[in-house]
Amino acid sequence: MNYDEKLFKEKANRKARKIWLIFAILLSANYGSDFSNGLYSTRYYLIFLALCWIPFITGEILLRTRGWNTERYKLDLVIGYGIFYTYVICTTSSPIAFTYVLPVTSLLVIYKDQLFMRYCGIVNA
């Protein structure tokens, strides 16, 4: 059985995209619930949504223009989610906000690139 690197990258990007979409929906709903209960202002929630969804949409455009096997998608994932996570961690009072970094960490495992995972782990820390 031959190893096809392009096929592996495509499958990894598709899985990462699906997981990222699920987390974006869940976090948007969670913060939407908090917003409707008066815990966050409209401005805060709109910035939250922009930082959550713009990187995802950018990644979607990247996948559609460069192809599903592009190497750049994992960088978009890390940088986009990193910006989003930084905003959340700096503006929330939730004691469990640190757990929001776990989705991006789990997504990095899909790519099976140890050096990349170490680099991203150090940057996130």
Image (cartoon, rainbow, N blue to C red):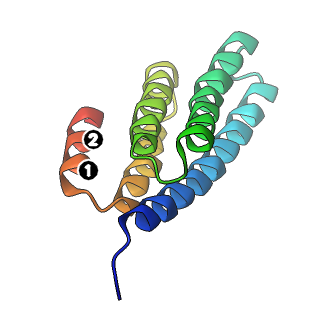
Q: Amino acid at mark 2?
A: Cys
Question: Which quadrant is home to the N terminus?
Answer: bottom left
**Residue at 70 percent of width and 10 percent of height:** 43
Q: Position of residue 107 (x, y in %)?
A: 43, 54
For this orientation, the residue located farthest to the top is 43
Q: Are marks 2 and 1 in contact (CB under 8 Å)?
A: yes
Comparing 16 with 125, the one in front is 16
Task: Specify the quadrant of the image occupied by residue 40.
Answer: top right
**What secondary structure is found at the residue carrying circle 1?**
helix
In the displayed structure, does residue 80 sit left or right of residue 49? left
The numbered dot on residue 107 is none
Task: Specify the quadrant of the image occupied by residue 75.
Answer: top left
Above-or-below relation of 7 to 23: below
Q: Position of residue 25 (x, y in %)?
A: 70, 44
Comparing 93 with 75, the one in front is 75
Q: Position of residue 16 (x, y in %)?
A: 51, 55
Comparing 54 with 8, the one in front is 8
Q: Amino acid at mark 1?
A: Met
In the displayed structure, does residue 92 sit left or right of residue 98? right
For this orientation, the residue located farthest to the right is 36
Crowding at dot 1, Cα within 10 Å, few <14 / some 14-19 / many 20+, comes out as: some
**Residue at 34 percent of width and 82 percent of height:** 2
Question: Which quadrant is home to the C terminus?
Answer: top left
CA gap, disc 2 to disc 1? 5 Å
Above-or-below relation of 52 to 68: above
Residue at mark 2: 120
For this orientation, the residue located farthest to the bottom is 1
**Residue at 71 percent of width and 18 percent of height:** 46
Crowding at dot 2, Cα within 10 Å, few <14 / some 14-19 / many 20+, comes out as: some
In the displayed structure, does residue 92 sit left or right of residue 27? left
Residue at mark 1: 117
**Residue at 41 percent of width and 57 percent of height:** 106
